[in-house]
Amino acid sequence: MEGDSVTLNSGVQTNQQDRVRWYFNDTRIAQINRDQSKICTDVQCNEDTERFRDRLKLDHQTGSLTIMNITNTDSGVYKLKISSGSSDSEKTFNVTVHGVSAAERDEVKRKEGESVTLYTGVMNNTNYVMTWYFNDTLIAEITGDQSKICTDVQCKERFRDRLKLDHQTGSLTIMNTRNTDSGEYKLLIII
């Protein structure tokens, strides 16, 4: 989805004999030279290309490439070429980025201390799995008639006793909001 990050895994551990090159639609966007003396991404690899400006991260150990804050225009074919001594290998990744329409993205503004309810717009069915995320961290989940709120420590600290789920609709209420509650909340419904 637009705004997410995606990691294209090389599936290998590189060493100093390897040369790793990433291409997007046949344009080089990232590279690690054999001795790792030259590591470049986007702007450094292609002087006039700023397509991914400050949105690429290259893992020096594996050669995996992470694209942050992806957009629809990042959809396409990504190729990884690894040269290791006398052998070359190539991997191809087809990335499709789906946009979030204005109807799917609501902006809610509240003052600190107020409550806010994020509505799903559906009636929950026992066959549905509904998961709520805050900045890509799972914070609540309804599976059938079972529900969980904040299963990890970080979430329990941040939202301590301030989240409430409506089991009929799956809507999420955040009580006594704080400035640190600002961010992106996503609802995933699996039918």
Image (cartoon, grey):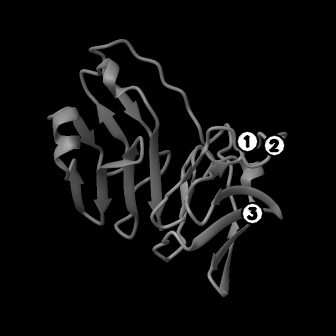
Q: For the residue labelled by badge 3, is the local secondary structure a helix, a strand or a loop?
A: strand
Q: What residue type is labelled 1?
A: Val
Residue under pointer 3: 23
With 149 as the anchor, is 189 left or right in this view? right
* Mark 3 or mark 2: whose residue is earlier in sequence: 3
Residue sitting at 34 percent across and 67 percent down?
A: 126
2 and 1 marks in contact (CB < 8 Å): yes
Residue found at the far top of this picture: 111
With 153 as the anchor, is 169 left or right in this view? right
Q: Marks 3 and 2, Cα distance to the nearest angstrom? A: 13 Å
Q: Marks 2 and 1, Cα distance to the nearest angstrom? A: 6 Å
Residue sitting at 31 percent across and 34 percent down?
A: 173
Residue under pointer 1: 43
Residue found at the far bottom of this picture: 87
Label disc, if present, on residue 181 of the rendered structure: none
Q: Where is residue 64 in the image (x, y as percent from the top left)?
A: 53, 64
Q: Marks 3 and 1, Cα distance to the nearest angstrom? A: 13 Å
Quarter where residue 161 is shown: top left
Quarter where residue 29 is shown: bottom right
With 95 as the anchor, is 65 left or right in this view? left
Residue sitting at 25 percent across and 63 percent down?
A: 145
